[in-house]
Image (cartoon, helix red, strand yellow):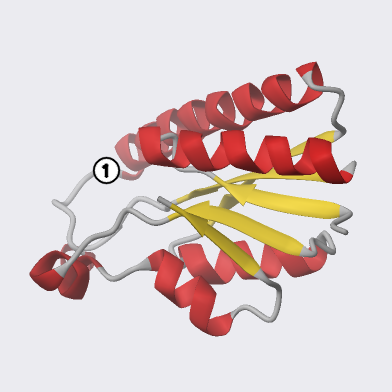
Amino acid sequence: MYQRILVASDGSPLSKKAVSSAISLAVTCGAELIALKVVPRYPQSYFEGSIGMSAEDSKRIEAGWMEESQKIVDAIKKSGESKGLKVKALLVKSDMVSDALISTAKKHKADLIVMASHGRKGMKRLLLGSETQQVLTHSEIPVLVLR
């Protein structure tokens, strides 16, 4: 059925449920699991929504984000490997989460993307956007969305 399943995680409780489901599906299919965390870049200018900050401080913050993100994908890898799966843990640095997710899935020849939907509605969805909606709209690879 599926040979390579990419699971995207942001470390939230809802995305942990999606990871658990992706691991179970990979075990059932005998598929390889690709664990992905997209790490944002720190905004560098006032117009991008940040307070003016030195380059060193920005790098320190990004390094902290990378460290936390590495823990997330390492935990997924450990969990998958404990079930006998081959797991690839990836971090991708990008401000465009949906684009990074889709391009990583293509690059690694995933035949399914698994991700959580946070179910934002109304003004929050309008203001924050929906990465899940963007992936669903633009991905040529099937997407399994869990809530």
Between 121 and 74, the one lying in front of the other is 121
Corner quadrant of residue 86? top right
Residue holding disc 1: 54
Among all residues in the image, which is located at the extreme front? 28
Q: Amino acid at mark 1?
A: Ser
User: Where is residue 55 shown, x and y percent of the image?
Assistant: 34, 44
Residue at 16% x, 63% y is 46
The answer to whether residue 31 shows anywhere in this view is no
User: Where is residue 75 shown, x and y percent of the image?
Assistant: 61, 22
Local packing at callout 1 (Cα closer than 10 Å; few below 14, some 14-19, many 20+) is few
Q: Is 107 on the left-hand or right-hand side of 21?
A: right
Corner quadrant of residue 127? bottom left
* As drawn, 46 above or below 40: below
How many numbered callouts? 1
Residue at 39% x, 31% y is 60
* As drawn, 49 above or below 78: below
* As drawn, 142 above or below 54: below
Q: Is 44 on the left-hand or right-hand side of 63?
A: left
Between 1 and 56, the one lying in front of the other is 1
User: Where is residue 43 shown, x and y percent of the image?
Assistant: 30, 57
